[in-house]
Amino acid sequence: MNKTIIIIPSRMSASRLKGKPLLEINNLPIICHVVKKAKETGIGEVIVATEDKEIMTAVEKNGGKVILTGKHNTGTDRIFEAFQKLKTKDVDYVLNLQGDEPMIDPKDIINLNNLMIKNNSEIGTLASVIKDNTILNNENVVKVITKEKLEKNSFTKAINFSRKNLSKQNSNIYHHIGIYAYKISVLEKFINLNQTKNEIENHLEQLRALDNKITIMVALAESSPIGVDTKEDFLAIKKIMEYKT
């Protein structure tokens, strides 16, 4: 039976909204909301990987598991260090769940994990249908272009990822959701590759995989959660989540 663990990279020094992991919604830090969603999937062990003791303290206080890492340029480098420190031998896949998406649906995470195992894929991620065209020219929102139209339970290749203005004339363009599933052997290969010019210029590490001919498969997410990139994002999410309760 295939085994998956979920590792959530998190740091205080995010460029657009410093300290965001500890911003509170319903008296719980954002990072702890993400841990809670990850645990709800029942997929496997959930670990936060961070260089910041403040995050470690908050997560442990709320019943989460944390591994303290060194400083890293990317979240993937961080999760790999955490994975190595776990010294777990029987894991087949690592799910890298972004620590700034407290509204992600556990069912979408489960579906991605199931598709990874079923298709024996290298890297997988999620995307949702774009319902608001302002997303197309919002550089805080990452878009993905896929080879084929995304359908429920389908898994199709990613052709490109972009933050920049994309016209709706591009076929099969979707709102990318910040989660990656890696086969362990591919994760090890990926972190040993040099950052590419394309990746550095666009601030998107998934482009390193595409530039090195590593296939990224995309599954359709039923929900389209807002990521917390700016203060405005945080206030919008806080309003929605606190209204629900």
Image: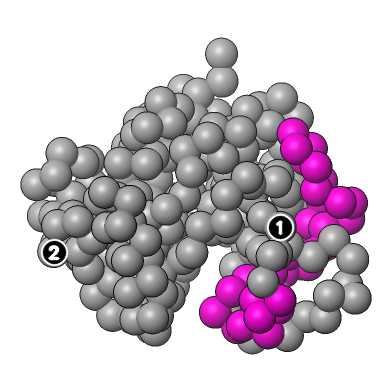
Q: Is residue 199 visible?
A: no
Which residue does the image show at 28% across and 71% down from the upper left?
A: 20
Does 146 sit left or right of 175 as displayed?
right
Quarter the N terminus occupies: top right
Q: Which of the two residues, 232 or 156, is positioned nearer the viewer here? A: 232
Crowdedness of circle 2 by 10 Å Cα count: few (<14), some, many (20+)? some
Instruction: Residue under label 1, please give it.
Output: 129
Above or below — where is 82 with respect to 39?
Answer: below
Does 172 sit left or right of 31 as displayed?
right
* Label 1 element class: loop
> x and y percent of residue 225 in the render?
51, 57
Magenta range is: 133-161
Does 93 sit left or right of 30 as displayed?
right
Q: Count the marks: how many? A: 2
Amino acid type indicated by mark 2? Glu
Q: Which mark is residue 54?
A: 2
Q: Which mark is residue 30?
A: none
Which residue does the image show at 33% across and 51% down from the upper left?
A: 244
Q: Quadrant of residue 222?
A: top right
Q: Is residue 221 visible?
A: yes
Front disc: 1 or 2: 1
Amino acid type indicated by mark 1? Val
Above or below — where is 30 with respect to 111?
Answer: below
Which residue does the image show at 67% across and 71% down from the upper left?
A: 132
Q: Which of the two residues, 195 or 103, is positioned nearer the viewer here? A: 103
Of callouts 1 and 2, which one flags the residue occurring earlier in the amino acid sequence? Answer: 2
* Label 2 element class: helix
Please say whether residue 177 is one of the residues in the magenta stretch: no
